[in-house]
Amino acid sequence: TPRPRERHAHLPRLPKVCGDVAMPMLSCGAAQTPATRAVLAHLVSVAWLVSAFGVKEGVRNAYVHVPFCRQRCFYCDFPIRVVSADEAALERQSERYLGLLEREMRASRGIGAPHVLETLYIGGGTPSLMPAAHLRRLLTSLEAEGIVCNEHSEFTMEMDPGTFDSEKLEQYLACGVNRVSLGLQSFQDDVLESLGRFHRRADVYEALDLLRQAGISNVSVDLISGLPGRDIRRWEEDLREVSGLVRSGQVNHVSVYDLQVEDRTVFGRRGLQPGDGLLPTEDVAAKMYCRAHEILEEAALEHYEVSNYALPGCRSRHNSAYWKRKPFYGMGMGAASFLGGKR
């Protein structure tokens, strides 16, 4: 079922025990917390896949999960870690997480031959909270395992409005990032507040201006339909606004997801259900889906997948690899690889 944020709809996940607990460094003498056990189980599963199935063809696609968020949105049940606003504390947490990622990479050693990736996707969470120096270190660690990008690779990084400035963005681009997935969800401040989002409308346009000034033309944005208290008219306002961004050349890809209420989210604990007076009925949600199709295709976007639209030549190569069942690495909290036809 489609979910908010472009990359999550087709990614298998580990048990959610990782999502709301601390992420200790792993060491031989360390006490094993639930998070440690979950990470160790993932390392064992990767090693088992290597030995049991092997991969004769090079794996050309990779997803790396960066779980940091400023706060948990009310619809979110993804494996994330709410981090401190203090830069020094965030850097320490990022350092610890990188250590876990590097251990996972070493456990995956020997999968296929050294190769160049067709796509690399840094998702989350909010990867744009990660210090740029840590992104460089992550790429260096991947390269040490023979997993590299070149000028032809699609290198996507998810970013949230209000989490980066021009200096940080330039540092990300210097690492090779050439495509940005920007988490909008809505342009309307009251809607964003009702979702528990950190940013507001002004942050969206500031982020888009930064991307434009940096020369990034390959930009995808996300919208969520079927939200509490929003009717078709207000949904169309968001669709027409994003269509304007497409026509102006600031956006070339749009992901549209219908809200799915999960039990362990704020919305789930509130007991929200379709047609309960807050959420639209299933019939209205279906009409919202149809209106998205109509309005976005008017902006010359191709509806090339259930939840995704792109200008000609601008489809997500990374997501297309999932849908075509191509092998891929999945690294980090909640991610799993697809190798030898097995997850």
Image (spheres, rainbow, N blue to C red):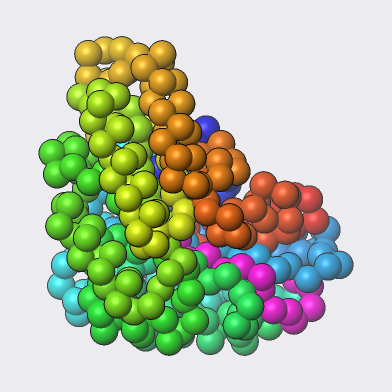
Query: Over which residues does the magenta segment extend?
Result: 111-125
- Which residue is drawn at the image coordinates 73% and 67% (left, top)? 59
Percent position (x, y) of residue 23?
A: 37, 63
Say whether residue 30 is visible.
Answer: no
Q: Residue 109 appears in which quarter of the rendering?
A: bottom right
| Extreme-right residue of the structure | 56
- Please state which of residues 128 and 83 is positioned toward the viewer in this rendering: 128
Percent position (x, y) of residue 49?
A: 75, 58
Q: Residue 299 appears in which quarter of the rendering?
A: top left
- Please state which of residues 303 and 134 is positioned toward the viewer in this rendering: 303
Check residue 148 for magenta coloring. no
- Which residue is drawn at the image coordinates 28% and 21% (left, top)? 279
- Which residue is drawn at the image coordinates 61% and 74% (left, top)? 153
Image position of 343 with respect to 303: above or below: below
- Which residue is drawn at the image coordinates 36% and 85% (left, top)? 171
Seen in the image, is 311 located left or right of residue 152?
Answer: left
Say whether residue 51 is visible.
Answer: yes
Q: Residue 66 appears in which quarter of the rendering?
A: bottom left
Image position of 208 with respect to 228: above or below: below
- Please state which of residues 320 and 115 is positioned toward the viewer in this rendering: 320
Percent position (x, y) of residue 293?
A: 47, 33
The number of numbered discs placed on residues in the rendered structure image is 0
Image position of 75 with respect to 94: above or below: above
